[in-house]
């Protein structure tokens, strides 16, 4: 007969069989790399492949009771714990995937935008900051730098006229810059699956896109 107490027996400091099984489950779901971002304990594999869990607050190895509690918490979503999926981690994974997709599209630095505009980098930096303050330009912080997504700009490097009224409510809302970028460049349910910034190019659709942006901004503030 299986001894349940053996399931949580420590094999090393911060390592239990439950902890190793939990780590394997998260790896299968491709969620392990998002633990730290979610403020959850993280693990490393030792030479034998066992997962060594550490408390994010103290940096110390976790004991059996802590690992059991973590296992129960991550399995609490859904009606069947055996098939539960930690939704918060799934959302973080989705966000990471979206950001990777967005980063693969064209963006400008201050220097590259200055070249398009035919102005100095300092002048461009100042203009970008002022436009961002007016909620008239989407600017995204990434890896300590600044990205200006190119989809919102015309050939001269200025904000497309039809996007101004679309950007303003979104940037003035509680949405972060990544969410705004994602909504504007991916199929949107509020527009029947059309991509907002592309639909806005059609004069007959511009007002509809603006209305959808206002509705989304209002929804985000609730």
Image (cartoon, rainbow, N blue to C red):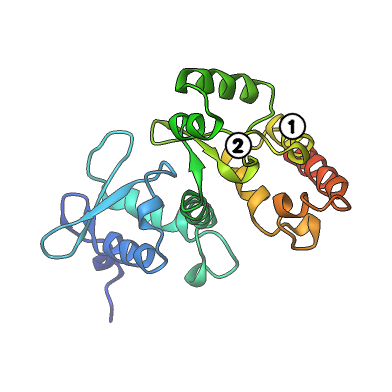
Which quadrant of the view contains residue 136? Answer: top right
Residue located farthest toward the front when viewing the structure as drawn: 118
**Above or below — where is 122 with respect to 111?**
above
48 on left or right of 66: left
Q: Callout 2 environment at 10 Å: few (<14), some (14 to 19), or many (20+)?
A: few
Residue 31 in percent (x, y) is at: 41, 59
- Residue at 57% x, 21% y is 129
Q: Position of residue 212 (x, y in %)?
A: 81, 47
The residue at the point 75 percent across, 60 percent down is 194
- Quick one: SS at disc 2? loop
Q: Which residue is pictured at 32% across the width and 61% down the height? A: 23
Q: Secondary structure at mark 1?
A: helix
Other-residue count near label 1 (Cα within 10 Å), few / some / many at <14 / 14–19 / ≥20:
many
- Camera-side residue: 101 or 64? 101
Q: Is residue 16 left or right of residue 216?
A: left
Residue topped by disc 1? 168
Q: Position of residue 215 (x, y in %)?
A: 82, 43
Kindly report which numbered mark, 1 or 2, lies closer to the viewer in this rendering: 1
**Residue 35, horizontal then vertical, whole percent:** 39, 49
Q: Quadrant of the C terminus?
A: top right
Residue 176's tag is: 2
> Closest to the observer: 220 or 158?
158
Q: Earlier in the sequence, mark 1 or mark 2?
A: 1
């Amino acid at each position: 007969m299986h001894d349940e107490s053996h399931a949580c027996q420590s094999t090393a400091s911060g390592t239990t069989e439950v902890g190793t099984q939990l780590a394997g489950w998260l790896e299968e779901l491709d969620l392990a790399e998002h633990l730290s971002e979610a403020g959850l304990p993280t693990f490393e594999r030792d030479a034998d492949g066992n997962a060594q869990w550490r408390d994010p607050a103290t940096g110390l190895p976790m004991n059996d009771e802590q690992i059991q509690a973590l296992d129960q918490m991550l399995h609490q979503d859904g009606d069947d714990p055996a098939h539960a999926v930690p939704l918060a981690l799934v959302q973080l994974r989705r966000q990471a995937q979206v950001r990777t997709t967005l980063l693969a599209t064209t963006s400008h630095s201050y220097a590259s935008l200055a070249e398009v505009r035919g102005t100095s980098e300092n002048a461009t930096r100042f203009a970008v900051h002022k436009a961002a303050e007016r909620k008239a330009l989407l600017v995204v912080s990434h890896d300590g730098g600044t990205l200006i997504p190119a989809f919102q700009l015309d050939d001269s490097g200025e904000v497309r006229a039809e996007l101004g009224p679309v950007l303003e409510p979104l940037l003035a809302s509680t949405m972060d810059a990544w969410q705004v970028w994602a909504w504007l460049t991916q199929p949107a349910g509020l527009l029947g699956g059309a991509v907002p910034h592309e639909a806005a190019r059609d004069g007959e659709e511009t007002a509809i896109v603006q209305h959808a942006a206002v509705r989304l901004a209002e929804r985000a503030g609730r």
